Image: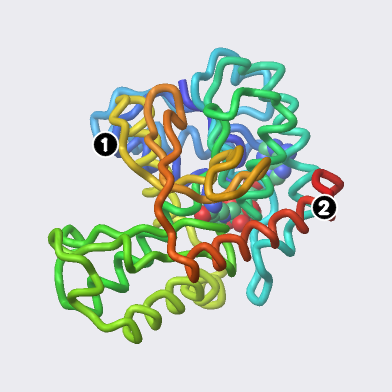
Amino acid sequence: MITIIGSGRVGSTIASQLVAESVDDLLLVDIIDGLPQGEGLDLTHMAAHYGSDVEVTGSNDYRDMTGSNLVIVPAGLARKPGMTRLDLLQKNTEIITKISEKIKEYAQKAIVMMITNPLDAMTYVALKTTGFPNNRVFGMGGMLDLARFTSLIAGSLGVSYESVQSMVIGQHGEAMLPLPRFSSVGGIPLLDMIGEGEANELVEKTRKVAAQVIEMKGATFYAPAKSVADMVQSIVRDKKTVIPVSAYLNGEYGVRDLCIGVPVVLGNNGVERVIELKLNEQEQTQFMKGATALKSALGQIGLHK
Ligand code: NAI
């Protein structure tokens, strides 16, 4: 059984994507009375349409997650227009600390996938509060940034999304690091297809596009839900897909004791291997900018000096 804690826009859309892909039985948990139960019923009817024999239930009681092997956490406050992800820090730390204590109590063996923003900081809070091994707690951020970068590359070249392979690492926030040097189109290096100036424009657009969506419709949820579903598939089917996730680093990329976006091999055991890219000086500087911002955010909540 997969538990999703937080049945708001992102949580319910993740559930709907997982039902459509017929992955596993689902439990939705939220603090709002009736909301997860209602989502559960609606999604059960959707499952009937798909002929997808998964059970979807809702609950306000964390105890019901007992026995879950995967817990996905999109609970807490979301950005409003004009806010950065880091603006949510204080309040969501309280929420994620409480939820992590419950996960530790009722789902000791679970893999935990964090979604709540600010993503890298909340992943670190969940890792430290549960005390689970590093491979079992990580966050979804880079996979979504990568989908945005991919869509912009494909759009600018007029090619199929399928032909584009891109990579985005670093902080899931303003200092994210889309990597044209590690992106390709039909196997051809991206920088052989477009000039550096054009690539830099796509990088800048990738950094800003989520804020634009929030400005226009108040939230993002379809693309995040599909990113989560792809990660879930890699875990439950032990596909060992190479995906950027917010993972705990202990010296890799010159960073110690932080969760930040890096490519990993994702399988049955969660983060099975961190892949270290050979960044050039400019890329490494940008990566460290994100790491430094994160350290200072964690300092604000008393988790880092
Ligand atoms: P939302 O406001 O629609 O839903 C949040 C839900 O969390 C609400 O139903 C609320 O009742 C519930 N909640 C709050 N405290 C809880 C607790 N202690 N236990 C259980 N449920 C609790 O917000 P939305 O749009 O679904 O966003 C959720 C989070 O996901 C936000 O922090 C947002 O910034 C983040 N997000 C992250 C993305 C990523 O790429 N990592 C992408 C999109 C959103």
Q: Is residue 283 above or below residue 7?
A: below
The mark total stands at 2
Q: Is residue 110 visible?
A: yes
Q: How is the image coloured?
A: rainbow
Identified at 67% across, 45% down, the residue is: 122
Farthest residue toward the front? Answer: 281
Q: Nearer the viewer, mark 1 or mark 2?
A: 2
Q: Which secondary structure, mark 1?
A: helix
Marked residue nearer the N-terminal end (1 or 2): 1
Q: Which mark is residue 201?
A: none
Q: Quadrant of residue 228?
A: top left
Q: State the image coordinates of residue 295 (x, y, percent, origin top left).
A: 73, 54
- Residue 155 point in image, percent of width and height: 24, 76
Residue at the spot of label 1: 49
Q: Is residue 8 left or right of residue 159?
A: right
- Up the image or down, 23 lies above or below 119; here it is above
Q: Residue at x 77, y 51 (%)?
A: 298
User: Residue 299, labelled with which disc?
Assistant: 2
Which x, y percent locates residue 126?
Answer: 68, 35
| Residue under the image location 53 percent in, 36 percent down | 113
Identify the residue at image location x=15%, y=71%: 159
**Mark 1: few, some, or many residues within 10 Å (few <14, many ≥20)?**
few
Tag 1: amino acid: His
Disc 1/disc 2 C-alpha distance (Å) = 49 Å
The image quadrant that residue 72 belongs to is: top right
Q: Is residue 104 left or right of residue 296?
A: left
- 240 on left or right of 42: left
Residue 9 visible (yes or no) = no
Tag 2: Cα neighbours inside 10 Å, few (<14), some, or many (≥20)?
Answer: few
Tell me the kind of residue under disc 2. Gly
Q: 269 and 29: which one is in front?
A: 269
